[in-house]
């Protein structure tokens, strides 16, 4: 008797749920090339034999798909578009899923069982099939929109659903490159040999502050970023010893692989003894992101044109500057599950840059960095390279080990195999939505 | 203001594929995983979404202030970008 009552209750609940006007609408964004569609199905709220309610998502595939030959990593991913977060990853072979028996001529149906609190009936969801095969070939795009048809929850042009206002916070820190950071504070240390057998510690500050803003001009995105950058050390005259401030202006073309950058900068040593003003146009050519993933490589080439307006070295004071520049940036970040030592991820950042001088420029003797009378003057190419490994303890705080070699304007004091360790705070300032 | 989430999702996927060149992506993928792997790629994506007549919002007769996408990073999930686009895009006829 109790069994019969239970079955009746389940049937009644199921019927009531089916009458609730919700359904699953299917969509494939590659309709022209993809003949598999996550097709008509029902999203039901039912009570199973236990008192716990569940969602059941029924997914119907076209018969061209062969679910019995699926690779083991084939899975469904459910994404909540309203909140912008993943809800569930469900391997097809999961005990939560089951293929409903069908005759060979009919489409295949999968059922996914989800906990009742995993879905919200006023949210919008998209369901992805990942790792599925069509005639033995991987399917690039297989997704279906779960769209509730309840009038108050259905997004449309005339009835867009409401979203929670984004909360202004600091976001993506150590995972970003220095270029991508609005606030970048890196305190580092190394050892300086001042005389044979005499070394002392050197504290280094590397600071970048930037305030980027976007605008459209002639249907092209323009990014303006006023910025200030300081690289200074506590040992007088020791590297690094450079400072710059000005504006970086990036123009984006219809081709994602071509970016035009213009820098308007004043660069100087930290005590302003050597100061230049330059205009630096540059073409940046980001390689396709799927090459060498997760490494991103951006070659660049351009020029730096301007003049020196302050120098203790008479031949260079007031002289024009013309430099050709080329090189490449390389960045990567690997997220880790929280390790025993608390590292959330490891980042890598490197750059090589060569300056080919059109006009003779100063080169401060690294053995006598404060003595400009011993500086030489020439047009030999000036290279600079650095590599930095970052260990992220939190999203914005980390530990760094870096290596540097080469010469940087305006003093071009040579840095020999400099290895530094330090602590890093790095963040982007998130703007408030209007 | 506002755009259908499904249409926004379709536009964003098209643009992410154009910039990142990774064919198999889902909304829960971070942009970095989808080949949008550097600040240059990220800003190119914003440009394509807002301005590309073949892949972006102009193709659907919508427009969007690029500053609405200023906060996205390489760690932002693709679905979150769709959400921001759906929230802020406006049909062209509503623009002054």
Image (spheres, coloured by chain):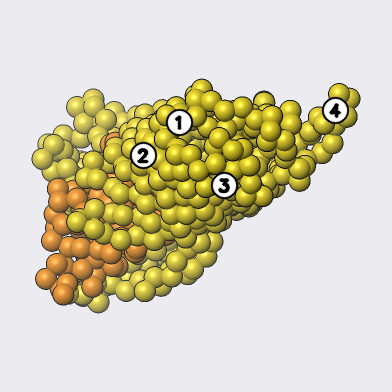
Q: How far apart are marks 2 and 4 (CA)?
A: 41 Å
Tell me, what hue is chain A? yellow
Q: Earlier in the sequence, mark 1 or mark 4?
A: 4
Q: Is residue A47 among what the camera can see?
A: no
Gap in Å between the C-alphas at discs 3 and 2?
Answer: 25 Å
Q: Which mark is residue A359?
A: 1
Local packing at callout 2 (Cα closer than 10 Å; few below 14, some 14-19, many 20+) is: many
Q: Nearer the viewer, mark 2 or mark 1?
A: 1
> Could you tell me residue A270's position as x and y percent?
65, 48
Q: Name the residue under label 4.
A: A195
Q: Element under label 4?
A: strand
Q: With respect to residue A339, does A144 lie above or below?
A: below
Asked where in the image residue A408 lies, by quadrant, the reply is: top right
Q: Is there a contact, CB below 8 Å, between mark 2 and mark 4? A: no
The quarter in which the C terminus of chain A is drawn is bottom left
Q: Around disc 3, counting alpha carbons within 10 Å, would you say few (fewer than 14), some (14 to 19), or many (20 or more)?
A: some
Q: Do labels 1 and 3 share a chain?
A: yes
Q: Which of marks 1 and 4 is in front?
A: 1
| Location of mark 3 (residue) | A310
Numbered disc 3: secondary structure: strand
Tell me the crowding category of disc 4: few under 14, some 14 to 19, or many 20 or more residues within 10 angstroms, Cα based: few
Sequence-wise, the earlier of marks 2 and 4 is: 4
Question: Is A297 on the left or on the right of A393, as rendered?
Answer: left
């Amino acid at each position: 008797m109790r069994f019969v009552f239970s079955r009746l209750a389940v049937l009644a609940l199921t019927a009531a749920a089916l009458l609730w006007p919700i359904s699953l609408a299917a969509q494939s964004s590659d309709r022209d090339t993809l003949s598999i569609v996550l097709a008509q199905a029902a999203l039901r709220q039912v009570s199973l034999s236990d008192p716990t309610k569940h969602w059941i998502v029924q997914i119907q595939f076209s018969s061209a798909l062969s679910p019995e030959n699926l690779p083991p990593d084939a899975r469904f991913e459910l994404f909540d578009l309203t909140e912008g977060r993943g809800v569930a990853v469900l391997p097809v072979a999961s005990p939560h899923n089951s293929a409903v028996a069908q005759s060979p001529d009919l489409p295949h149906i999968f059922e996914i069982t989800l906990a009742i609190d995993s879905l919200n009936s006023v949210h919008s969801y998209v369901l992805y099939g990942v790792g599925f095969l069509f005639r033995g070939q991987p399917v690039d795009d297989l997704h279906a929109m779960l769209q509730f048809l309840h009038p108050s929850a259905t997004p449309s042009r005339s009835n867009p659903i409401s979203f929670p206002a984004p909360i202004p916070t600091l976001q993506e820190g150590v995972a970003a490159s220095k270029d991508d950071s609005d606030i970048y504070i890196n305190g580092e240390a190394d050892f300086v040999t001042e005389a044979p057998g005499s070394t002392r510690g050197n504290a280094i500050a590397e600071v970048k502050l930037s305030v980027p803003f976007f605008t459209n001009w002639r249907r092209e995105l323009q990014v303006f970023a006023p910025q200030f950058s300081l690289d200074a050390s506590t040992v007088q005259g020791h590297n690094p010893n450079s400072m710059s401030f000005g504006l970086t202006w990036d123009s984006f073309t219809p081709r994602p692989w071509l970016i035009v950058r213009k820098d308007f900068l004043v660069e100087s040593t930290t005590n302003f003894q050597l100061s230049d003003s330059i205009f630096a146009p540059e073409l940046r050519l980001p390689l396709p992101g799927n090459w060498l993933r997760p490494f991103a490589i951006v070659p660049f080439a351009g020029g730096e044109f301007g003049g020196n307006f302050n120098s203790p070295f008479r031949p260079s004071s007031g002289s024009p500057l013309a430099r050709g520049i080329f090189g490449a940036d390389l960045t990567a970040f690997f997220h880790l599950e929280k390790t025993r030592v608390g590292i959330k991820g490891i980042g890598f950042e490197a750059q090589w840059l060569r300056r080919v001088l059109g006009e003779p420029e100063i080169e401060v003797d690294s053995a006598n960095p404060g003595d400009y009378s011993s500086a030489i003057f020439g047009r030999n190419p000036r290279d600079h390279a650095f590599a930095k490994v970052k260990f992220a303890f939190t999203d914005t705080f980390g530990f760094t080990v870096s290596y540097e070699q080469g010469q940087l304007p305006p003093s071009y004091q040579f840095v020999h195999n400099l290895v530094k360790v330090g602590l890093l705070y790095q963040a982007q300032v998130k703007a408030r939505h209007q | 203001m506002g755009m259908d989430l499904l249409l926004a999702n379709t536009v964003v996927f098209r643009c992410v594929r154009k910039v990142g060149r990774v064919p198999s992506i889902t909304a829960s993928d971070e942009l970095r995983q989808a080949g949008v792997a550097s600040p240059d790629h990220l800003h190119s994506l914003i440009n394509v979404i807002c301005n590309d007549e073949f892949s972006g919002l102009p193709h659907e007769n919508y427009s969007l202030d690029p500053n609405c996408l200023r906060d996205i990073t390489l760690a932002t999930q693709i679905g979150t970008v769709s959400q921001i686009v759906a929230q802020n895009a406006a049909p062209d006829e509503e623009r002054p």
